[in-house]
Image (cartoon, rainbow, N blue to C red):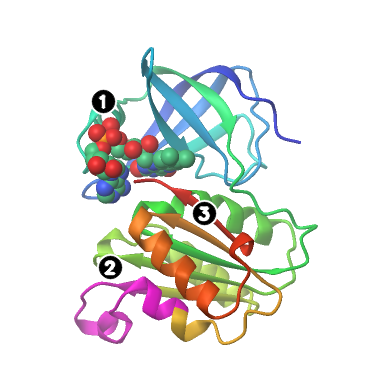
Amino acid sequence: MADKPRECRARVIAVRRLAAEILEIDLLMVEPPELAFAAGQWVSVPFGPKTVRAYSIASAPQSSKRITLCADVAPGGIGSAWFRGLVPGAEVSFKGPQGGFVFTRADPRRPLFVAEEIGIVPVRSIVGELYATGFGRSAALAYWARDPGWLVYDAEFLSLARRYPSFAYHPVVASATGPWRDAAGGLAEVVDRIVADIEGLVAYVCGGERMIHRVRDLLVAKGLDRKAVKWEKFW
Ligand SMILES: Cc1cc2nc3c(=O)[nH]c(=O)nc-3n(C[C@H](O)[C@H](O)[C@H](O)COP(=O)(O)OP(=O)(O)OC[C@H]3O[C@@H](n4cnc5c(N)ncnc54)[C@H](O)[C@@H]3O)c2cc1C
């Protein structure tokens, strides 16, 4: 079960650059020594009395002593500057876990995950946990980025799709040449193409507000109940 949100401290133990402007960090929990969270939850980093930035946990909850965060640092504000400045050994403080963008396997519906760029972070945790713990039912992921280099975690999803035929993975990029040429387009167009039947569907949509509205309106127009579209707005 997920912990109630609490003040936490952790130490940076690794920093990786996944793309030109996307950084991933591993944190070793210090206080508490383990963080129980549900896949899809986030932590908030304080920058002043009323200023925080939220970061979803990219790793799956099976690992509670060591968690991973992943950020697009292109926006360039205080959150991005903080993330860019993290080095191994640095101590960080945050409050977590928080949020309800979680999929419980007691839910009998078929999950459709829709992620725009760094919006993939909570989805990576949810999908990773589901398949690591024997989720046998079907699930689909539509994942958009401006170009293939921004599709971080693409190799992981390809590998999952190869191992689990019930997992349908649909990467798409705004513009592409070479092998990606046929996967160029917009996220709503992909969702439109892959959702033929809304019966028993539940959608988890994460990214920017405009995309969330477009995808939700599209699914609702296909007959899906508005409440069956869960969303997490990053920007
Ligand atoms: C629940 C939740 C979870 C989040 N999880 C993550 C996460 O795991 N990884 C992550 O990178 N961010 C995540 N975010 C966004 C994050 O909290 C910050 O907003 C982001 O890092 C930018 O902060 P900043 O201070 O650098 O820029 P700001 O000064 O806050 O933002 C500058 C401008 O950029 C826009 N913006 C912010 N992020 C993006 C983006 N990715 N693409 C395009 N425009 C953007 C903002 O709306 C604003 O207009 C999450 C947000 C929420 C609400």
Closer to the camera, 165 or 120?
Answer: 120
Q: Which residues are magenta?
A: 172-191
- Ligand 1 quadrant in view: top left
First in sequence: mark 2 vs mark 1: 1
Q: Which residue does the image show at 21% across and 77% down from the upper left?
A: 176
Q: Which residue is mark 1?
A: 85
Q: Which residue is mark 2?
A: 148
Amino acid at the residue labelled 3: Trp
Picture coordinates of residue 181, whole percent (x, y): 25, 84
Question: Would residue 229 be found to the left or right of residue 4 on screen?
Answer: left
- SS under mark 2: helix
Q: Which residue is mark 3?
A: 231
- Say if 120 sits above or below 58 in the image: below
Q: Is residue 180 magenta?
A: yes
Dot 3 surroundings within 10 Å: few (below 14), some, or many (20 or more)? many
Amino acid at the residue labelled 1: Gly
Confirm or reject: label 3 Cβ below 8 Å from ligand 1: no
Closer to the camera, 146 or 177?
Answer: 146
Picture coordinates of residue 90, whole percent (x, y): 37, 18
Is mark 2 in CB contact (under 8 Å) with mark 1?
no
Picture coordinates of residue 56, whole percent (x, y): 48, 40
Does residue 99 show up?
yes
Quadrant for residue 185, please give it: bottom left
First in sequence: mark 3 vs mark 1: 1
- SS under mark 1: loop
